[in-house]
Image (tube, rainbow, N blue to C red):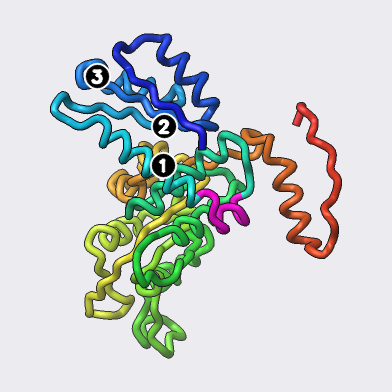
Amino acid sequence: MPLDVIFVGEFDEGLLELVMGLSQRGSKRVLTVTGSGVLPNKLEAWRILRAGASDVLIWQNNGNAAQSIAARLNRWALVESLMTGPYVRNHLIGQSPAWKATVRQVVEIAHLSDASLLILGESGTGKELVAHLIHALDPRENKKELVLLDCGTLAPELVGSEFFGHERGALTGAVNARDGAFAMADGGTLFLDEIGELSLPLQPQLLRVVQERTYKRVGGNVWNRTDFRLVCATNRDLTASAERGDFRPDLYYRVANWICRLPPLRERKEDVLPLTHHFLKELRPADAPYEIDEPCASI
């Protein structure tokens, strides 16, 4: 992937214009390198990032700048190699700068950290596909399954059982004990879709499991341990929900170690044609590629 390294001796508006031009809205990686004291506060660093820089590296006078730069570039090279892997190529279709920048961030966090992720996006933007990508790139040895639970479709009388499982006889019709999502996701990934729909009474229970990694089945007395990577998704503004009191702020900060916003198709018009070809190929795999006119600029 093309990239540029900018060494900064002074912060000014010209630097921001240079970063904007070189980054091309995320098409190219730009690493900004500066010594301590050049940027008086964090605001300048954030302005550089918003201008399009992929990272701002600040080294101390006693540090080894060359090693720090090499480590960052090696990390990016690994990410780019994963970007060309079969899962990304075959499932996360698109070459627009907005889409590539988003997928690149997801790949980096998924493979090089164990952080919980919150995926934001409108319906149809690919939130479940991204959750599968995060699980596929998770480097844990002997990881288990990805478990999906849609919080927007849970029946109120069964929601506890869906999450925690239940013991025999704990519920009407419960003739056998049953594992819930926390047990099934042990050693794997738990994907909570539409977490913004989760009821307030259940939110503190989920928070406890996320913090303590222990839970009890409905009707049980035994504490069970679980260890999973948490990935959540929503089309709601959870920050606003937390401010209104509809969503617990402490749970929000637990599920949103890292936030990914998926751009809608209107923000990635360059991908309309590749996506059309992809879906036609899935529907009619035996057919020759279709000839399709370029979408008009007014879309």
Percent from the top left, x then y, of residue 125?
59, 46
Q: Is residue 237 magenta?
A: no
Magenta stretch prevailing secondary structure: helix
Image: magenta residue range: 83-92
Check contact, mark 1 vs mark 2: CB within 8 A: yes
Tag 3 secondary structure: loop
- Please rate how many residues cluster around mark 3, counting C-alpha atoms within 10 Å: few if below 14, some from 14 to 19, many from 20: few
The reply, left or right, for residue 124 in relation to residue 9 is: right
Given this view, does label 1 or label 2 mark the residue nearer the observer?
1
- Please rate how many residues cluster around mark 2, counting C-alpha atoms within 10 Å: few if below 14, some from 14 to 19, many from 20: many
Q: Is residue 241 above or below residue 130?
A: above
Quick one: label 3 or label 2, which is nearer the N terminus? 3
Real-space Cα separation, disc 1 to disc 2, in angstroms: 10 Å
Tag 1 secondary structure: helix
- Pick out the residue farthest to the left: 62
Q: Is residue 86 magenta?
A: yes
Given this view, does label 1 or label 3 mark the residue nearer the observer?
1
How many numbered marks does the figure carry? 3
Q: Which residue is mark 3?
A: 41
Residue 129 visible in the displayed image:
no
Residue 172 visible in the displayed image:
yes
Check contact, mark 3 vs mark 2: CB within 8 A: no
